Image (tube, rainbow, N blue to C red):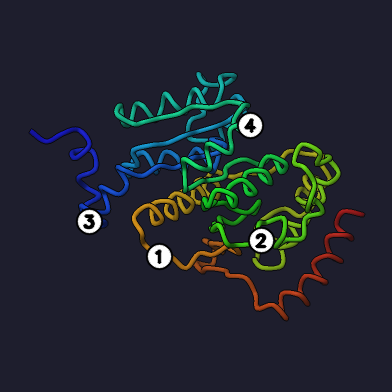
Amino acid sequence: MTDFYSEMTTRNIGFITEAEQQCLKDGAVFVAGVGGMGGAAVQMLVRAGVGKIAIADLDSFEISNLNRQLFAFTDTVDRPKAEVTAEGLKRINLDLALTVLGAEWTEKLDELCAEYSVIINGCDDIPATAQLYRKAKQHGATVIDAYASPLPSVIVVRPTDPRPEERLGYPIKGTDWKAITEEQAAACFMKELEWVMTHSSSHSHVDLTAAAEMAAGKRKRMSFAPMVTTAGCLMAGEALALLMGRKTKTDCRGWFMNTRDAKCERPLPAPIGALKAVIVRRFMQRLLAG
């Protein structure tokens, strides 16, 4: 008799080999944040057959999550995201080895990064994300992430790669993550937006007035289901490739998927990027001032 796991994953074979499927069954991934991108990513991992998953989230579902988050339904509003997601994942694979964490996950990063060599970051808290990256480097774990962008994107930060705080010039180098202020976090976010606008056509895909209000903290982050879910699937794809030992061309700088123009947008060469960044900074300053 065919066992449940083999039957569940039988249609994967052909896209991947039996040996690679076994790698997924034996594989382990930690997903920090299971809202939009993280929720989409972890569902893809479990459906692909990853055998061991840890998830963490400290928030509960809100009505505004219904536009994009795969585990958000009218009957899950006000329920903890981690708890609801865990129930959904178990409905896919009863044999899944699943660890569920809430707000305490940041205090368990040493053991999580030691146990899970592949990590997906679906958390939008800058201090917690900075600590996640720092601990991942200490323990030799790879972090898969995405930019705050209106275009789907994906980043793979391996243990020897610079951390985003180093590469993007965040003003928090050497600062304990618990001591990072709201002003510093906001400055980090602006550095990320500068990179996104410099190296992609993101400005063409969003209302810039609304974007300026978001950057100024006057409104919540904008999110749209196709962008969020696609980014989550890209992140899951990179995690699966790592578990199977497949190489991809995604690096710590990442890339953007421009679905409207049907093209992949990669970071500009350094001299051109530096010149455009100056223009982008001036543009952002005028936009925020307006």
Q: Nearer the viewer, mark 3 or mark 4?
A: 4
Residue beneath label 3, please?
Answer: 17
Asked which secondary structure carries label 4, the reply is helix
Q: CA distance from mark 3 to mark 4?
A: 38 Å
Query: Along the horizontal axis of the image, is 103 left or right of 263?
Result: right
Q: CA distance from mark 4 to mark 1?
A: 32 Å
The residue nearer to you, when weighing 273 against 201, is: 273
Q: Position of residue 114 (x, y in %)?
A: 50, 42
Q: Please, which residue is most extreme toward the bottom here?
A: 271
Asked which secondary structure carries label 3, the reply is loop
Q: Nearer the viewer, mark 1 or mark 2?
A: 1
Identified by mark 4, the residue type is: Glu
Q: Nearer the viewer, mark 2 or mark 3?
A: 3
Give the tally of numbered discs.
Answer: 4
The residue nearer to you, when weighing 92 against 110, is: 110
Residue beneath label 2, please?
Answer: 202
Residue beneath label 4, please?
Answer: 107
Residue beneath label 1, please?
Answer: 247
